Amino acid sequence: MGTSAVLMTKKDNKIKTLQYQSMDGYISGAGIGIFKNLKLADIDNIKKKDIYYFDEQITQILKNNLNKRPSEVTIEIPPILLLSCADVIEYLNETNQEKIGVIEYDYEWIEFANYLYIIDFDENVFQIYENHFSDYECKNCLKIGEITFKKFERICECKLDNLPSVKQFKNLVDID
C-alpha cells in the first residue's frame, strides 16, 4: 500500500500546480525531497515562471494518456506531469521554459492523499499537512478558498526566505 501525497503551489492567489504522487508521499520521502529541492532552488526564479492551465480539450487528452502504458501513449506528455512531487520543484527551478502548461485538477480530490505539501509564493511559506482520514477536529485545519478540510492538520510551516537546515527541518517534522 502506498502513501500518497499532493504538492500544491499557489501564486497570485491561485492554485498553479497540483501534483499527485501515489507512492512514497510520507514526510521522510516526498517531504524531505521537496524541502531539499526548495533549499537548493532559486525561489525568485520559480516565481517568475508563467504556469498556466491547458485548455479543457488538451487537458482531457493528457489525462487519458497519463493512464496508459508508455507504448500506448500517442502524444508528447509535458515532462512536469510525469514527475514526483519533489522533482517538480527541481524542474521548475532548472527549466529554461518561461511558460509551463499544467493540467487543471479539481482540488477537492486532495482529501484522499495522506500528505499535502503546499508552497505558497504569495505568503512565502512551505507548509505540510497530514490527513487523519477520520472525523478529526483539527486546530490548524486546511482551508482553500471556501472549503475547509477538517481532516488535514498542519504539522509544519517554514518561511521560504528563511528555511531551516535539513537537520532542523527533520527535528521540526519529527523524523530521524
Image: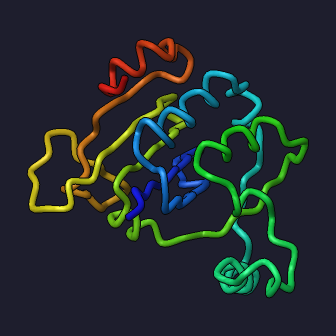
Picture layout, residue 171 above or below residue 92: above
- Most distant residue in the front direction: 1
**Residue 42 in the image: x percent, y percent?**
73, 25
- State the residue in front, 92 or 114: 114
Name the residue: 40% across, 70% down.
109
**Residue 148 in the image: x percent, y percent?**
25, 57
- State the residue in front, 121 or 7: 7
Picture layout, residue 41 above or below residue 8: above
Question: In the figure, is residue 123 to the left or right of 138?
Answer: right
Question: In the figure, is residue 100 to the left or right of 81?
Answer: right
Total residue callouts: 0
Q: Quadrant of the C terminus?
A: top left
Question: In the figure, is residue 61 to the left or right of 152?
Answer: right
Name the residue: 81% across, 83% down.
73
**Residue 94 in the image: x percent, y percent?**
82, 36
**Residue 17 in the image: x percent, y percent?**
60, 55
Picture layout, residue 82 above or below residue 169: below
Name the residue: 10% across, 54% down.
136
Applied colour scheme: rainbow
- State the residue in front, 96 or 112: 112
- Residue 26, located in which quarter of the rendered image? top left
Name the residue: 14% across, 40% down.
139
Q: Quadrant of the N terminus?
A: bottom left
